[in-house]
Structure formats: C-alpha cells, structure tokens
Amino acid sequence: MAWRRPLLIAATAAMVCGAALPVLAQTSLWPAPGPPVPHRAVHPAVSPPSSALPGTYMSTSQLTALQLAACERRLERARQADGRHVPTVAIVGASITAGVGPGQPDGSWAALLARQFGWDAVVYGDPGAGYVRPGVHRRGPVAREIAQIGLPGLDPELVIVQAGHNDMGVPADLEQQRVKQAIAQIRAAAPRAGIALITVFAGRLRRPAAYQTDHSIVQAALAADPAVIIMDPLAAGWKYQRVRDGLHPTAAGSAWIAGQVARILQAHGVRPAPAPPGGGAAPRNSIICDFGIQAAPPTQAPPVLR
C-alpha cells in the first residue's frame, strides 16, 4: 500500500465491569479529530433501505472470495483517490453484528459505528457463532470468520470481535484456548492492528453460565495480550432497547450499542477518521462491505463439542 498509518504503540487499558483500568502508555491510533465529518448521499452499488444512513453500502448473504476481493479493490481505489489515510476496521461476530434485531445488516451496531467514525469497514456476522460454536450457517466459529475476511489484504487499524453469548455451556478451558487462538490469529495476520473484544450479551435471565463464559473470555484475552480492549456488556450491565426475545437490540438499541462502543474506543485513544487536509476537499462516505447473515433457522441444537 502506498499510504502508511501511525503504529499502534500501546493501548494497555482494559474496560471491565464498566470501568477503565489505568492507562500505562498509550498513543492514539489516529490524530485527534477535527470538526465532525458530514456524510453526503451517493449512489450505492446496492440501494440501502430508506432508514439507512447515507453512504456506500454493499451487502450480500453469501461471502465469497470474489466478492471480498472486489470489496478490497474498491477500498484500495478509494484510498488512492483520496490521497489521504481513511482508517479501516474489520468486525466479526454473531447475530448482533449480523443485524438481527433491527432486521437489516446496515442497521447493526457495527455498520453504525463505522459511519459514525468515518471508517471504511468489513463486517461479517453469523447468528449463533462464537469462539467455539460454528453458527447456524456454519460460517463460524470466530477463527473461521477472521480467516474469511482476509486481514492481510485489508490491513485494518482495528479488529473487533463480538462473541460469547452462544458459547455458554462450553468448557472453560476450551473457551479460553479458542479466545487465545483468535487473538494470536489476528496478531499474525494484522500485526499493527488494535484488537477489541465485545464479550457476553445476556438476555433477560442472567444465568451462571453467562458469567462463567464471560470470565473465561476476559481472562484468556488479557493473558494473551494485555493491550486488548475489552468491552463487557454483561459485567457493565448494558441497558439498551431490545426486541421481544429479550436479547437482540431494536434499531434504537443498535444505535445505543454503537454509541457505547464508540465512547469506550475513544477512551482508549481510538479516533475518527481525519478530515481532508486543508479543509477544502469534501469528505467521502464510508465504504462498508457487510456480509452479515440475518436469516436463522427457528431452532437448531448446538453442535457436539469435541
């Protein structure tokens, strides 16, 4: 790539139970933001619903190497045309990342977050996926999702993983092993990227298994890499509007989650995309390649763990 970004020197604070641990030596991923960057309507490749925020939006229910390669080429062309650095974030996860609840991928917290920060993004979620569970469409687990999106080609500044709820009942040692493997996989494929984890979203019933899984993820992540940013909806008691199942967010709930994630990231030095130099050039819209899979079978027994 012709452009270079500042190296992530350290992001050593972790957000657990809604409070940030002391920051030891942290350098921002990007320069401090200027005035808010507006978005202008464009002609997207796939027209989003009228409720969607303006921007270029590409969505499909089937992730293929060809589609992802085309998406990466478009991102690269946009970078070259801008003559400036626009950060890229890769987000993988389960149903909440896939847009279940709002009913459309571009209404997910992940798509809203990317637009809010002015990032380019690749978003990939499969309902039911976890660090161990493969998901209802067998696009997971997390390690497979990470491999599918091709981190070396994206060269992202930040990788966010949303997983945990679907792994309730998984043995703690297996869960911890898979979390450590996922972090090592990200580090190997995108060594300069920051890593953030969103852990367990609990439904109305706070089962002991939820807390066990949450603890396993947090413990394993910090053991694997103390610089990982941890966002813990269960321990922090995130309260957002939910649909009737008591777990998935409404459109307003997704917006709340996006805002909460944005605040935590900013507390760790992550900044929105910089404005164009000189203030004369009009900012372009975020390019979001969303491979969220919404549809899920009504019922499906969890796979046997081996």
Image (spheres, rainbow, N blue to C red):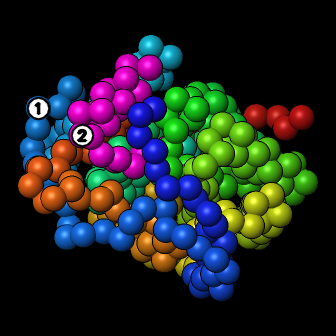
Horizontal and vertical percent position of residue 48? 20, 37
Residue at 76% over, 45% down: 184
Q: Write down the quadrant of residue 278 in the picture.
A: bottom left
Three-letter residue code for mark 2:
Asp
Residue with the mark numbered 1 = 43
Residue at 66% x, 72% y: name it: 12
**Residue 300 or residue 221, whichever sits in front:** 221
> Could you tell me which secondary element the residue under label 1 belongs to?
loop
Residue visible at 64% across and 67% down? 10
- The disc labelled 1 sits on which kind of residue? His
What kind of element bears circle 2? helix
Magenta region: 69-90
State whether the magenta stretch is mostly helix, strand or loop: helix
Q: Answer with left or right where residue 80 lies relative to residue 258.
A: left
Residue marked by disc 2: 82
Asked whether the viewer can see residue 60, the reply is no
Q: Residue at x 49, y 34 (%)?
A: 154
